[in-house]
Image: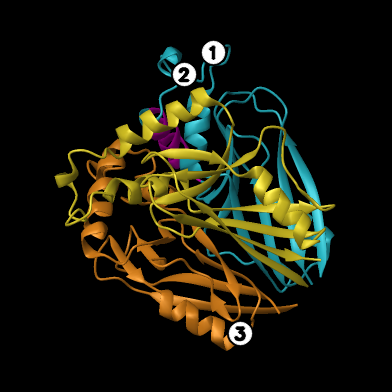
Chain colours: A yellow, B cyan, C orange
């Protein structure tokens, strides 16, 4: 069994942002030389997500509006977590969008359906944060 | 390390539907000959889910009502994604229900608790869509 | 390829409770002797979760309030599942918080970012329930 590990770093301009990381994960896979196995891609921080969905700007707008309705940022005083912090909503939003994805590796490729793309979802950005790519297989 | 791959195809009668796929995943596992490892089961489409919960009709009704409250289909114009499409809500519902499950394989069986069953959750059906089963191990 | 399996048992005092299980999962990893691979940690029951987030009491209070708003326990009669049961809300809450986490194993350690901690999330407690730890690798 082979294993491969890489960290991807991000520093978003905005508090909430979605970054398509499919190409970077694919480069990791090529670098790993693994042909058959599983690729784990996870946020290493607890106010961000890695998820798979559509690379469509309208939908990303919809995600932001929807998550803000389900877990509003303001008023920040509504959350007990917000003592010297203001990111409680980011911890909640991340639970809806998920921490990680596990992707099948087949024939040396990410084994995706037609529209699947991997995103880093940031809910408390404007500072350096990381994603972990771990691939195991042969 | 062995690896196994299979696609399961579905074409639901309704826009929203839940299909118990536990038996089909179990057949895949038997076919794979893998005794110890991990089974990944994921939707290959971005308006559907694979999740584990109870095989109980009342609960499935509750899921549908609840998801409709959290991410309503109508009015479809409320979503920026819905330009020539009407399935933005399906992309949101899938985030709550999840894209994939990873199940332990132990002694040649899906290593489940007493009530765990695997479901395909469709939120934009009435057309052909796929689930991927990928199993690795020995 | 090595594989390792262990069940962790819990019996919470309250209906809703969060238990930090990071140390126990770490002990499993040491016991397994696996240095490189993937660790799956999943609830074996369908009204509980395993998730990764912050070990901070204020945030856990916020989770409870938030989940109660998104999927209220009462009135229990609002759910079709609640015929002779009252835990439909637990099935819904578990979908938001997730069934499982997959954690990279690197150099014999759980490969975590600075604040990542693994929790058992109980939404229908006061009885014995289990978490499965399955680790594969070398």
**Mark nearer the viewer, 3 or 2:** 2
Q: For the stretch drawn in magenta, what is the main secondary structure?
A: helix
Residue A136 found in image quarter: bottom right
Residue C49 highlighted magenta (yes or no): no
Total numbered badges shown on the rendered structure? 3
Q: What element does badge 2 sit on? A: loop
Answer few, some or many: residues within 10 Å of disc 3's Cα (few below 14, many 20 plus, some between 14 and 19).
many
Q: Residue furthest left?
A: A77
**Cα distance in 3D space between marks 1 and 2:** 7 Å
Q: Is residue A103 above or below residue B36?
A: above
From the viewer's side, name the closer residue of A94 and C124. Answer: A94
Q: Mark 1 points at which residue?
A: B83
Magenta residues, start to end: B56-68
Residue B104 falls left or right of residue B78: right
From the viewer's side, name the closer residue of B67 and C11. Answer: B67
Q: Name the residue under label 3.
A: C32
**Cα distance in 3D space between marks 3 and 2:** 49 Å
Asked whether the residues under marks 1 and 2 belong to the same chain, the reply is yes
Where does the image place residue B63, in percent across and percent down from the top left? 44, 37
Q: Residue at x 72, y 69 (%)?
A: A3
Q: Do the residues labelled 1 and 2 touch (CB within 8 Å)?
A: yes
């Amino acid at each position: 069994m082979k294993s491969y590990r890489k960290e991807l770093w991000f520093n978003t301009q905005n508090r909430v942002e979605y970054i398509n990381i499919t190409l970077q994960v694919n480069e990791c896979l090529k670098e790993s030389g693994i042909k058959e196995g599983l690729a784990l891609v996870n946020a290493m921080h607890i106010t961000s997500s890695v998820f798979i969905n559509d690379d469509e700007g309208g939908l990303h707008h919809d995600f932001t509006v929807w998550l803000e309705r389900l877990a509003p940022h303001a008023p920040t005083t509504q959350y007990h977590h917000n003592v010297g912090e203001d990111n409680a909503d980011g911890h909640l939003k991340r639970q809806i969008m998920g921490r990680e994805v596990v992707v099948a590796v087949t024939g040396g490729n990410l084994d995706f359906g037609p529209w699947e793309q991997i995103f880093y979802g940031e809910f408390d950005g404007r500072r350096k944060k990381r994603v972990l790519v771990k691939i195991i297989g042969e």
